[in-house]
Image (cartoon, rainbow, N blue to C red):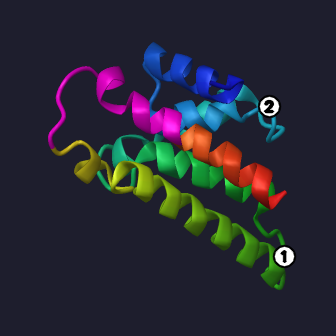
Amino acid sequence: MNSKVDEALALFKEGFSCSQAVFAAYAKDLGMDYEMALKVSQAFGGGMGGMRGECGAVTGAYMVISLLYGRTKAEDGEARLKTFTMVKDFAKRFKEKQGSTVCRDLLENKSGSHYDMCSDYVKDACIILEEILEEYK
């Protein structure tokens, strides 16, 4: 495993949400205060505020991509296209690996602790994100 995976899994095991674990593992790379990264990403956990929508590990990765490559000027179509392309590629790979990017689908037949149910999603989100960031830099 790599350091981002290890850091994200440690955060997740500590009790932070899937989105917080993935996003905060990249806080330093994003030039973001660690505490701020945890706060910004909290609402995305549990499939968007616990509503079991888009997986928090997935949205944590989307936020990393957006902060690294997102546009800051409305007319910057190139940055918009790159960000959307990377997000779509991430989603495709995550679906290929896990079958869905939706929390309720991923957890449909699972039971157990917070960590046991979702640690593979946190791990795979970080691994796929590392691949995407390397390929698109």
Q: Label 1 amino acid?
A: Lys
Where does label 2 land, which residue? 28
Place residue 113 in its image quadrant.
Answer: top left
For the question of whether residue 122 can be seen, the reply is yes
Residue at point 77%, 56% (across, down): 135
Name the spot of residue 14 as percent of width and height, x first: 47, 14
Range of residues picked out in magenta: 109-124
Residue at point 57%, 26% (across, down): 8
Is 114 within the magenta? yes
Q: Label 2 amino acid?
A: Lys
Question: Is 60 displayed left or right of 2 in the figure?
Answer: left
Question: Which disc number belongs to residue 11?
Answer: none
Question: Is 92 displayed left or right of 89 in the figure?
Answer: left
Q: CA distance from mark 2 to mark 1?
A: 24 Å
For the question of whether residue 40 can be seen, the reply is no
Question: Which disc number belongs to residue 73?
Answer: 1
Is 9 within the magenta? no
